[in-house]
Image (cartoon, rainbow, N blue to C red):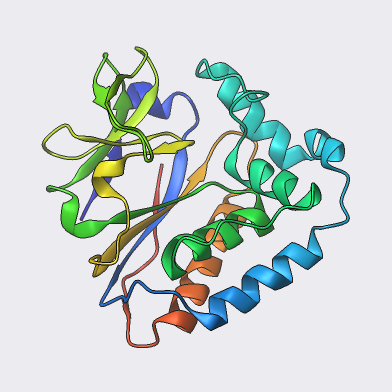
């Protein structure tokens, strides 16, 4: 599977790392549960208000403003998850795959997208939206994407992601998922090594939970 960033979207400073993983098993897993507990302990004593001064959080917040998203209402995923822990709440328990992505996002503050590869048609591209429909995870009906927002689409022009903050229900990971596409999302002023590190961490956690999984190469796209 190939992914390209169209010129107008590239001008926003978007870059990413991706990896395909086959032969996964979606389940509840004690190894991942232990990692979740470790992360909850590690970040339980932070001051949530201090996050807005973190340079990584600042970079993603600035990008949100640039694409017309208010980051005080829709927070970058890593920031939102760390705030959740700092306020005494547990991380969500979805399944071993989604939970692995959440752990990596908490640790690195880099947004992670994980998709059912079997539901993606052909190759992918990131482009600026032109009013396409998008069905978010957890929603009952589709909504129109504001024009000019970076979106990830497949060859059917199906919107699977609003970059870098919302995923589609159409390609979400379920108990029937056997193959994955994982993306770690970079924006201006974020170190490329950190974005790659986030993808490596997800991979390590999935390997811990799915030792027979087959891992493709890590690919940088910019």
Whether 189 is drawn above or below 85: the answer is above
Percent across and percent down for residue 68 are 52, 15
192 horizontally vs 144: left or right:
right
- Outermost residue on the bottom side: it is 212
Name the residue: 49% across, 36% down: 165
66 horizontally vs 119: left or right:
right
Q: Nearer the viewer, residue 151 or 136?
A: 136
Splitting the image into 4 quarters, where does residue 127 fall? top left
Q: Is residue 199 something that shows in the picture? A: no
Name the residue: 41% across, 41% down: 222
Name the residue: 32% across, 76% down: 25
Whether 142 is drawn above or below 156: the answer is above
Q: Nearer the viewer, residue 196 or 151?
A: 151
Percent across and percent down for residue 199 are 50, 61
Whether 19 is drawn above or below 152: the answer is below
Percent across and percent down for residue 48 are 82, 41
Splitting the image into 4 quarters, where does residue 83 fall? top right
């Amino acid at each position: 599977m190939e992914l390209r960033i169209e010129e107008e979207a590239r001008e926003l400073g978007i870059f990413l790392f991706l990896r395909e993983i086959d032969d996964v098993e979606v389940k509840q897993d004690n190894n991942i549960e232990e990692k979740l507990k470790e992360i909850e302990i590690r970040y339980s004593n932070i001051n949530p208000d201090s996050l807005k001064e973190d340079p990584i959080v600042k970079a993603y917040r600035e990008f949100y403003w640039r694409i017309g998203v208010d980051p005080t209402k829709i927070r970058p995923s890593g920031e939102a998850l760390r705030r959740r822990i700092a306020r005494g709440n547990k991380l969500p328990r979805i399944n071993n795959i989604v939970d692995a992505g959440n752990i990596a996002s908490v640790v690195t503050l880099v947004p992670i997208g994980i998709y059912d590869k079997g539901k993606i048609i052909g190759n992918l591209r990131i482009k600026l939206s032109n009013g396409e429909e998008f069905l978010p995870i957890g929603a009952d009906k589709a909504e129109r994407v504001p024009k000019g927002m970076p979106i990830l689409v497949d060859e059917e022009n199906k919107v699977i992601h609003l970059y870098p903050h919302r995923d589609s229900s159409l390609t979400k990971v379920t108990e029937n998922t056997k193959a994955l596409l994982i993306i770690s999302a970079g924006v201006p002023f974020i170190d490329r090594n950190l974005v790659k590190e986030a993808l490596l961490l997800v991979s390590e956690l999935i390997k811990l939970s799915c030792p027979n999984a087959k891992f493709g190469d890590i690919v940088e796209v910019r």
